[in-house]
Image (tube, helix red, strand yellow):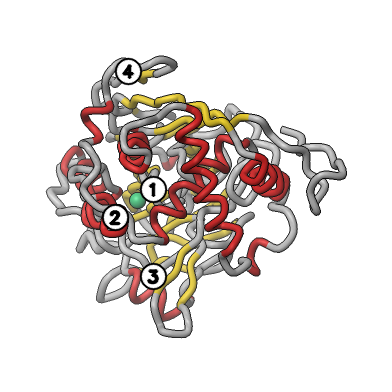
Amino acid sequence: MPGPKPNDRTPTGAEPIPTARLTLTSYQRAIVEHLAEGDTTPRSLGALLVKAAAFDAAREAEPRWAGARRAHRRATPHRTDALIDFEIPAASGAAIALGPGETMRIEQVADGQGVDLCAQELAGRRRRLSAGRTRAIHGLHPTTGAVLWSTPPEVALLTIVTDTAPSHDLTFPACTPLEYEQLTGLPGHLSCSQIHAELAETRGLGAPGVDDVLNLWLPTAVDIAAMLRWWPTWCRRGDRIDLRAERKVLVTLSTCPDDLFGASQYAPSPVRVIVRGSRANAFRDRRVTLLPHRPELRHELEIELSPASSDRLATLVERGWLGYTAGAVARALLFRWYEALGGQRHFGATPPSAGSSQVASKGQRSVQSSPTSSFTWA
Ligand SMILES: [Zn+2]
């Protein structure tokens, strides 16, 4: 969407915004209700946002976010010569078998969806991706030309051949329920580790949840105290990474269900997968396993904005790093504030369960699930 037009009111020239409409997952809604002590009227949420916006304005400026977030790219045209072209739904996963020389493109269809990638040989020793070995050879942020290596004795599994938004991470493990529960006090959050474990089980590999992954599009760094840091994903729709298979491999991908830390820009979204190669090389067995799209309630909340938080939102919408609507930026500010202060450890008693929020509410949308499917193209 186009950014606000300049006026005289704010130093950056952005126009004030009267209200913000937030779309929230059930976990997000449970936390917002907790912060507002159950009173989720537009006015009480506005008071909450004033605090979050003031906290954000007082934080040290992020050098990474100087200037505006860059433009999106055109989506890859649909071509009939693709062996596979499909979308992995939000908070779900897929396993894709590749033959030597085939390439797999993973492409953003929304702005800023993190993806955890794992790979495993489909023959021989069935070695899996080694984040440690790959990191030792290519550093923390592999990009074009980097080879994804296996556990010992090492072999090349995949090579990155195109990368339009280099910001991939080899420091963090796949997300697990632990980090969500530490933040919120709420158990049972879906995680990338669980998604990869379900994919392995469905494919009959019997492997436990993965730990070593390549975190696609997760901006990270090591700080001066040698602690790991991350930022919300900044890739735009149309950004893509191409990987070439160096042997027969099974690639498992999860569209990260993180709605609290920014790995999905606080709005888990789908990604697109395109495989190209020789049809003569195509697999006779199952090529793709796609997990079901889990039922997902999204709750709509409207916030009345004070002049101060309105100005802050208008400025941030113009820059785009936390989203391109007032609602997206307001949501990001609330959860960045919650995380920075330590979540439930700071705000007191554990929020009500996210499950209790999954009751009918005005504006709610639900997404129907479908059974696990395995299908083959080409
Ligand atoms: Zn994740």
Asked whether the beta carbons under mark 1 and mark 2 sit within 8 Å of each other, the answer is yes
Q: State yes or no: Cβ of the residue under disc 2 lies below 8 Å from any atom of ligand 1.
A: no
Q: Which residue is mark 1?
A: 260
Q: Sequence-wise, which precedes: disc 3 or disc 4? A: 3
Q: Secondary structure at mark 3?
A: loop
Q: Find disc 2 in the rendering and name its residue.
A: 183
The amino acid type of the residue labelled 2 equals Leu
* Neighbour tally class for label 3: few under 14, some 14-19, many 20 plus, Cα within 10 Å: many
User: Is tag 1's residue or tag 2's residue first in the polypeptide sequence?
Assistant: 2
Residue nearest the observer in this picture, 43 or 29: 43
Q: Tell me if residue 71 comes above or below residue 25 in the rendering.
A: below
Ligand 1 lies under 8 Å from the Cβ of mark 3: no
* Residue lying at 47% horizontally and 84% vertically, measured from the top left: 224
Quarter of the figure with residue 78: top right
In the foreground, 229 or 282: 229
Indicate the secondary structure of the residue bearing disc 4: loop
In the image, what residue occupies the spot 27% across and 27% down? 357
Residue kind at label 3, given as amino acid type:
Thr
Label 4: which residue?
A: 368
